[in-house]
Each structure stands twice: as C-alpha cells, then as structure tokens.
Amino acid sequence: MLRSHSLRIFAIIAVILALGATWKWDEIQRLLALNSLFAEESITRNFSAMDKLFFHAELPMNSSAISDFPVNPQSLPPLDDWVEARSLTALVVLKDGEIAHEAYFRGTHEEDRRISWSVAKSWLSALVGILLEDGAIESLDDPVTRYAPELKGSAYDGATLRHVLQMASGVRFNEDYFDWHSDINRMGRVLALGGSMDKFVGAVGERDYQPGESFQYASIDTHVVGMVVRGATGRSVIELMAERLMEPLGLESRPYYITDRHGVAFVLGGLNMTTRDYARFGQLYLQQGHWKGQQLVPAHWVAESTVPSSPTPEGHIQYGLKWWIPEDASEGEYLARGVYGQFIYINEPAGVVIAMNAADRAFLRPGSFQQNLAMFRRIVETLGGEESSAL
C-alpha cells in the first residue's frame, strides 16, 4: 500500500514538472488536493470544505425564509460504538417532522456544508420527476440522444433515460475508488484540471452489456441524466434545482455544487449542504413530495422512483430510479447513499428520516453498510412507528 501510494505521488510530481510551464498554480493545487482528499489526516476537514479545493457554484437562491424543524429530543439506542466505527461527522434524526436527535462529531459543526457524494443522485432524480410532470421531458423511455445529441455515436447511443436512471446503461466504466487508473478517478482528475465533463462522457465508447440488460453501478450514467435535463430545458441543473426544489424547501444555507471549469455541475456527487438540509429532503420524500401546501415532487414519482425497478441481482440491495432499497425492506423503507458514509434513510410508516454524514475510510469493508442499516432500524424501533405528521 505504501509503495503504491509513493509511486502515485511520484507520478503526479512527474506530470507537474513536465507540464508546469503550461499549468496555472491553482490547477496544480487542485490536483494535489484530489490526491490527498481522502487521507486520514484531512478527510474530515476536506469533506466540509470542498469549495476551497475545486471549482464550484453556489445555487442562486433568493428567499431567506427557512422552514425550521420543531425540536423534540427523544432517547435513542447507544450510539457511541457505531459513531466511532463508522467515523460519523453528523447525525440528524427526524420523527414526525421534528428533530428527535442531532449531533456533530470529529470537530465539525452544524453549519458545515458537507459533501453529499452519491446522495446527490437522488436529488437529481427528484428534478427529473418534476420535469416529466411539466412535460419538458416527454418520457423515461426517450433515448438520451434526443436531449443530448452530442452522445450520438458514443456508448450511450441507444440507451434511454430510464436506463441511465437505473444504472443499466451497460457502458464500460470502472468505479473502483481505490484504483488510480479507474474511470471514476480519471473523471476526478478532469474536474481538478479544468476539463469538460461532457467531453469526458462523450468519449465513452464501449459497453459491457446492452442497455437495460444488467445493473452495473456507473456514476457516469448520472452525468448523462444531467445532460438530458440541460438539453430538455435549455437551463442548468444548478438553476433548476434552486428554483424547483431547494428554495421552496426553505433550506437554511445556500448549497453549492462542485463543477467543471465550464460551470457544469458534478451532479453525480458534487452537492454540498448542511446535514439538516439533507434531512429536509428526506422529509419531503417521506411526505410524498408535499411541502407546506405545495406538491414539489409528484407523489407518483416519489412512489415509482423508490421501489426496485433496476435489473439488480437477487439477494443484493436493490435499486430504483437513483434510490436504494434494502433487499429485505419493509414497504416505504429506502435510502439515498453516498461513498464514505453519506446517507438519507427514510422509513415512511414510522415517520422517521435519518440524515448521516461521515468520513468513513472503511466504508467498503464487508459488513459496513449492514452495520449502518441495522442502526437505522434500531433507531426506528426505539422511536416507535406512530403515524407521520406533515410539514
């Protein structure tokens, strides 16, 4: 491991020396930041300060009206061992629309805007549901090239919007976070060095499966969803997300997205906001898309997107339209999930939402996800399952 890390650093230094004459210093800094992003000594700090490390854009929100949660502290099962094992940085538990528990760890604070990683995918799913209802997008079964014609001739030619929402495009994409040469890490370097995400996606030319044939988690699929949204509306995801979801939700802080140099949002994992604001999104879904007298997300879309529909293997966690469903889930139990321990867990019948952020470098070890899910369910059991109230 040490030898591999040293070789990687040497490779970066070699590249910097070779191209230093043409690079700007800020690009060098972003590349070095990317290399140390998940280091043990800096991961917690980095996850609350992504705007200091990468291109980013704050959402253009005008309203100052915050939808406050009532606070009603309640007892939870013992949490200390779990918090330590999974390196939690924040935990917000809602019961019937009230804060039953809130805590911050590892020197972080309630106002920190924390990186979502793949929890951002579920936010984008909500926006797609809104645009389908509007008619801006006609059908989930439209080919993605209808709205993103620049993908014609790529591996995405022939895939539909449904396929990319389900992670079933079939494109060849290496999602190994710990392989320096993997596609997901090459994508990270595109962001750090100011490249174009759209061009990166358009260059993907190989498939492992035909579209719709098999589930294969490929974060790049979610960027294609973002391209469809932009092509269908002529507007940026950042503008639409602020206008249609985040401002009406009454978030307490101004979220931001990591972007490429061209201002295109890193929709597959670049959203940053406070943990209470992640909890607000969970509460919106628990309430079937209804919020303070408005139907922000169509109720039928909430229902359709949060049940298994992707061709995932039996006996494994299931996937819907950018939402995860445990293989033994009870009705109305689902979650948004991001690397290094980011979660929004929703249990509709119990009226419980759990928003969790972490800096869990062991998130891929066997049993890690199961430990989190088991604790979420213990919290639900401890709080009881009374009927949920709506904000």
Image: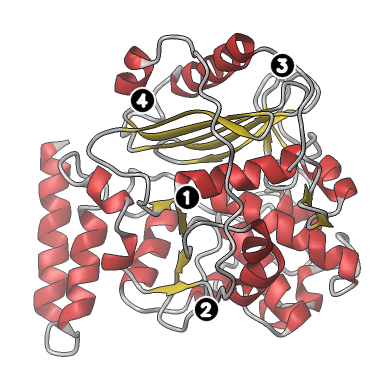
Q: Earlier in the sequence, mark 3 or mark 1?
A: 1
Q: Is residue 299 left or right of residue 337?
A: right
Q: Which mark is residue 116?
A: 1
Q: Looking at the figure, which quarter contains the C terminus?
A: top right
Instruction: Read off the residue under disc 4.
Output: 86
Q: Nearer the viewer, mark 3 or mark 1?
A: 1
> Between marks 3 and 2, how big is the CA–CA gap?
40 Å
Closest to the observer, 390 or 279:
390
Q: Relative to 179, does residue 35 appear above or below in the rendering?
A: below
- Residue 138 picture location, percent across and down: 91, 70
Q: Earlier in the sequence, mark 2 or mark 4?
A: 4
Instruction: Read off the residue under disc 3.
Output: 328
Amino acid type at mark 2: Lys
SS state under label 2 = helix
Q: Is residue 203 left or right of residue 87?
A: right
Q: Residue at x 49, y 22 (%)?
A: 372
Instruction: Read off the residue under disc 2.
Output: 199
> Between marks 2 and 4, how big is the CA–CA gap?
36 Å
